[in-house]
Amino acid sequence: MKFRSDPSTIRGSIAPVITPFTADGAIDHDGLRALIRFQLESGSHGISLGGSTGEPSAQSAAERIAGMRTAVEEIGDRVPFLPGTGSHKLDETLEITAAARELGADAALVITPYYARPTQEALYQWYATVAREFPDLPIVAYNVPSRTAVDIAPETVKRLFSGFDNFVGVKETTKDFEHFSRVLHACGRSLLVWSGIELLCLPLLALGGAGFVSAVANLAPTAVARMYELWEAGEFDAARDLHYRLHPLVDLLFVETNPAPVKWVLAEQGRISSPYVRPPLTGPTDTGLTRIRALLAEGGDLTQQIGATK
């Protein structure tokens, strides 16, 4: 809750931590605590849980809330906590968001409702309902059209940002980089925008973005956090060098559906006890593993860099 009163301080690399499961599919809370400690020790500037990388659609509301509770206990008030609290159902979204508020989350990351393909007016009403229900909690829209089949328009973001003091930003996970610029142009630079697309994380900072929520931070948290810090310090060439060095690990993430490749690597490294992903996902195929190993050999040195970045 330390950062809730001033969400503009929620900047940098917000690591979207995977949800570790045991080999029989139960949430591994001890493993989750260890992953969060790993992120904090590695210099990540914040923690997210329950975004796409965390497999939220394969969990019950009770499981997601239990995971948030574990995360809050481990984080304390050391860095901001931005849990994903949205779903395709409004009542479930309100239930999970209420729990996040009570647990002390600094902001709630609310995905556009998936499958139904709501209109822009319907999206406005959806977020307006959440914002009205939790006036003391900063709300961040999570725009990820590749998974939800709906894209929240810049004009809709502007309506929400203008109409609700607690609607503070958007996590943009679209490869349409013009969209990033149009959102900031419509709303002004006081809107907080984070990139959820790995190879657009660094470019967004040039437009005035607040940072990124990049799944590659699960593998190379120090490098991802350092990239942000170098840019902020004006060391642009060094930041670009890290951007390009991260390319193999970015490609690794998406050899097969995220987070299966990440979980396999973390299990191989001993950071989690099992690479299990819940259905409908499966672990990497043999063909996928061949590619994952090759990319890890190319970029794996960055996974070994661990330590506070400053």
Image (tube, rainbow, N blue to C red):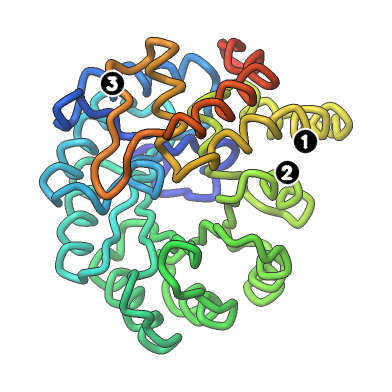
Residue 310 visible? The answer is no
Q: Earlier in the sequence, mark 1 or mark 3?
A: 1
Left or right of 259 in this view: 24: left
Q: Nearer the viewer, residue 44 or 59?
A: 59
Residue topped by disc 1: 231
The 10 Å Cα crowd at callout 2, few under 14, some 14 to 19, many 20 or more, is many
Would you say the residues marked 1 and 2 are in contact, meaning their CB atoms lie under 8 Å apart? yes
x and y, in percent, of residue 128 in the image: 34, 77
Q: Amino acid at mark 2?
A: Leu
**Residue found farthest to the front:** 287
Residue 67 visible? The answer is yes
Residue topped by disc 3: 274
x and y, in percent, of residue 60 in the image: 14, 50
Residue topped by disc 2: 202
**Image point (46%, 77%), residue name:** 160
x and y, in percent, of residue 226 in the image: 68, 25
Left or right of 273 in this view: 94: left
**Vertical relation: 191 (above or below) 272:** below
**Image point (42%, 14%), residue name:** 268
Q: Quadrant of residue 150?
A: bottom left
Q: Nearer the viewer, mark 1 or mark 3?
A: 3
Q: Earlier in the sequence, mark 1 or mark 2?
A: 2
The 10 Å Cα crowd at callout 3, few under 14, some 14 to 19, many 20 or more, is many
x and y, in percent, of residue 67 in the image: 21, 36
Image quarter of the C terminus = top right
